[in-house]
Amino acid sequence: MVRKSLRHRLHVQLEPAAWGYGLSPVNWVLCILILLSFIGAILETEPSISDGQEQLIRVLEVAFSSVFMLEYLLRVWVCVEDGRYRHPLAGRLRYLVTPAALIDLVAVLPLLVGVVGTESLMLRFVRLLRIARLAQFGKLSRSVHYLLAAIVSRRYELSISVVVAAMMIVLASIMLYWVEKDVQPEAFGSIPRAMWWAIITFTTVGYGDVYPVTQLGRLFAALSALASVAMVAMPTGIMAAAFSDAMQRGRHELDDPVKLPGSYLDKNSQKQRSRR
């Protein structure tokens, strides 16, 4: 009985769905450790920081991986508390092949294969995905859900802006190809080559590696630069409206979260009513 109670308490702490709203204290600690591990992997690529600190880096990586290994084993142990994996053996095997469990497994692969340091860099970067896995319930998931819903509701406007942007880029590429192809064949000798300049110009990046040198080419480039302002403003305005809608839905949730259809609290309340 004590063992079952301990397993249940660990399940509530480790599984976001079992906790219900937000992140449990254990998952908060895990998120912090994931971020620290991710930051350490980034700093490790800077020679001025990592040179001479190889032993410390190895110790820290082993420590992080050991914590994630312990967490992984505990999740496998407590997964039978979930009704989907109730069977002690078959349920655990079924849990091991779920996307969430596979992401957790990647987090401990450096320790399992005995590889640390730069060789395991990409595996350690994957750990950042675990934050999204841990925060799949609670405020974050609902906010992301509302934002995606708002964007989907404006998919037609976004599609039109994408088509208009593509047409403007192609038109600018054709104009610069026509004007500059004889003067700068390396940069504007074909429409695909000119399209590199057009994309850089319309996205306002402006590398400056290629640019028109003829008077007519500069005129077309100036018109393209002015048109790029409108091109960037269109999707920006649409996205701003989508963010506004997401914020409004978030405020309604805070006012009455139980009545919000599809929310976790709404589903939880329905389960409680059905049990009664």
Image: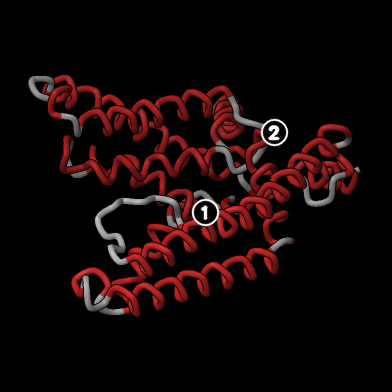
Residue 172 placed where, x, y %?
44, 71
Say above or below: 208 vs 38. Answer: below
Say above or below: 223 vs 246. Answer: below
The residue drawn where x is 52% and y is 42% is 132
- Amino acid carrying label 2: it is Tyr
Label 2 packing within 10 angstroms: few (<14), some (14-19), many (20+): some
Label 1 packing within 10 angstroms: few (<14), some (14-19), many (20+): some
The answer for how far apart the CA atoms under marks 1 and 2 are is 25 Å
- Left or right: residue 246 compared with residue 171: right
The residue drawn where x is 32% and y is 42% is 125
Say above or below: 109 vs 64. Answer: below
Residue 226 placed where, x, y %?
52, 57
Q: Say the numbered circle drawn on residue 91.
A: 1
Instruction: Identify the residue under disc 2.
Output: 21
| Colour scheme of the rendered structure | secondary structure
- Amino acid carrying label 1: it is Gly
- The image quarter containing residue 188 is bottom left
